[in-house]
Amino acid sequence: MIRKGFATFVLACYFLPNWGCAQNSTLDAQLAQWRVLLSQGAREQVIDSCNRLLHQAPGLPAAEKAAVLTLKASALRLEGQPDAALALHQQALRLRTRALGAAHESVGNSYLNIGNCYLETGRNPEALQALDHSRRILERRFSRTDTNLIAVYTSLGEGHRLQRRYTRAAYFWNKAAQIAHSHYPGHAAPVISATLNCAALHSETGRFDSALVLLQTARAAMHAAGDTLQTRYIRVLNLQATAYARLGFPEQAIPLWKRALQLGDAAPDCPNWLRGEIRYNLGQAQLDLGDLFAAELNLQAALPFFAGEPFSRSRVWNGLGLAARYGGDPERAVACFTEALNANFEYGPEYAPAFENAGLYRNLAGCYLDQKQFQAATYYAEKALAMLRNLPNTSADQAACMLNLARAAQQTGDYPAATQWLKQAQTKITPNDVGLQFALHYQSGQLAMAAGYYPQALDACRNALAVLRVAGPVLVNPFPYETVQAYAAMADCYRLMARQDGGQAAWKTVLDCVRQAVAQLEDLKGHFEAEHSLPEAQHTFSRLFDLGVEASLALADPVEAWRWSERFKSNFQQQLAWRALHWSAPGSLPEQVAAVQHARKR
């Protein structure tokens, strides 16, 4: 998910020289020097300088003290401490209101700063309230086409995007873009930032092709302008990678994220949230490819960057939960999803994000399905579905809940209920949603297989494979994990038919499907960076090796059966070895869970 991409541009409001705050020319000059230092990444130096000034001159006039507090808050926010920055901005607001009046432009800018801090901590309703207050003050002070309004319109767009109000987000971002285009050339920083915001919105709403076009436009403008702001270029890479990943091409996205990560770690002006965001996105892409160990490493590395941002931290815990679940450890997955929920409730239930919590409840339902705890699975899936029905733009998420409910009903033998849930899910899924289309056909095949309708089950599996096929020539399969699943399901179905038929032709078909599935599994493993992911993925599909043994024995080929058995045994030994190494390593996930729980008790 693209998050807080507006921050690089909005931070420009901190460096505006005329906020009506400092009347003393010496202080003005000093603050101007510190703003330059802050733009160069000297955050700690600026914080120390502000602290010394506040200590040495306790009698500063209110407006001047507010200017110093605002600069210190800017540095703290860049340091990844939005809560501390928020407290200082609120103090500055009180000082300015008393000294300059509630309608002064600097008061409006204080509300803007407060709103941005709320956005970074996920308190979106409070953010929108503060930002709207800022907008009203600034619109009274400036004309509706003044450049001083760009920052507040940009932040309002981001706030509405985070609330999934895409029409309102587009409204404010378009206003910001219109002002920028009317005052600046196409290669100017405000125009580039507006283009990036539009690209982010297009990506968020599924218009990935147009998002990539906008990003190419932004890159060309940056190149033409000789743009040296590293953070803006890093943001472009992050957005481009996100668009490619959401189009189903994580192999193209991952090199871009790696480049962004390399640049971000070397750039002094790159904020912590962006470094964490890139690690999170990279981990999610590796998760989609089934590279579970590499994904877990990047997700763990992202956690410290979000120490002061519970909602961002929740997303990382959610990713770690998915890695654990896909790795066959549902109990650890439940622990991670629970940590994610706890993080979302840190500010109190009134600020808990409903959409994100619904997703976590849905993931818990999946874990309990894996553990065959169908009552708990049904409870969490229904809880998630009830929440999503009250939220806009959630048809796909509702469909995912319905698929979970169908699976739970099937596993308990309630085939009519399972069929009804699948029919409801079908009405929510769009043709462009490849993942859910695949899941619908796959789950339909599982239901038909359980009911003994093997031809229908095979048709559903073939439909699932057809959904995954990309038009035109491709160098790599963008859906290797799902392809293995589909072939494995077909092999299982043919096995059931072969047991009834008993003929060698049926068992040969089983073995053909197993070989196709294993070939796809090898292709899947070829994309992994972390060698520890190899046995993990093979363990996930260990059923294939059982089918290979059974089919070979049915075909009176004990040598081939022995080969299938040895492949599974070798994989199992590798898995035991790397698990022992992984869990003894410093900074492992169980230790991080314990550290978070200990910090909460304190």
Image: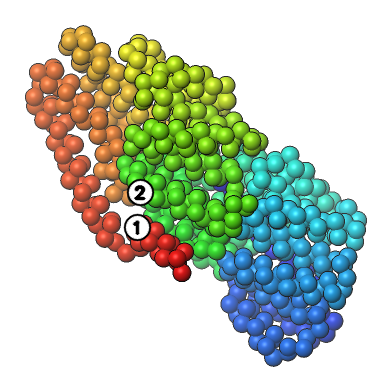
Locate residue 406 relative to residue 392 in the image: left or right.
Answer: left
Q: At label 2, which amino acid type do we have?
A: Arg
Q: At label 1, which amino acid type do we have?
A: Pro
Q: Residue 590 carries which label?
A: 1
Q: Position of residue 318 (x, y in %)?
A: 46, 48
Kindly identify the residue that appears in the image at 25 percent across and 52 percent down.
579
Pick whichever, 432 or 82, lies toward us: 82
Tell me which corner region of the image, top left, top right, bottom left or bottom right, holds residue 269: bottom right
Tell me which corner region of the image, top left, top right, bottom left or bottom right, holds residue 503: top left
Count residues near mark 2 (Cα–Cα under 10 Å), then give few for <14, some for 14-19, many for 20+: many
Q: State the SS at label 2.
A: helix
Kindly identify the residue that appears in the image at 26 percent across and 25 percent down.
514
Q: Kindly check if marks 1 and 2 are in contact, taking CB atoms under 8 A apart as contact.
A: yes
Q: How many marks?
A: 2
Q: Position of residue 259 (x, y in %)?
A: 49, 55
Q: Position of residue 159 (x, y in %)?
A: 69, 50
Q: Residue 332 carries which label?
A: 2
Pick whichever, 47 or 593, lies toward us: 593
- Tell me which label, 1 or 2, sits earlier in the chain: 2
Kindly identify the residue that appears in the image at 25 percent across and 13 percent down.
497
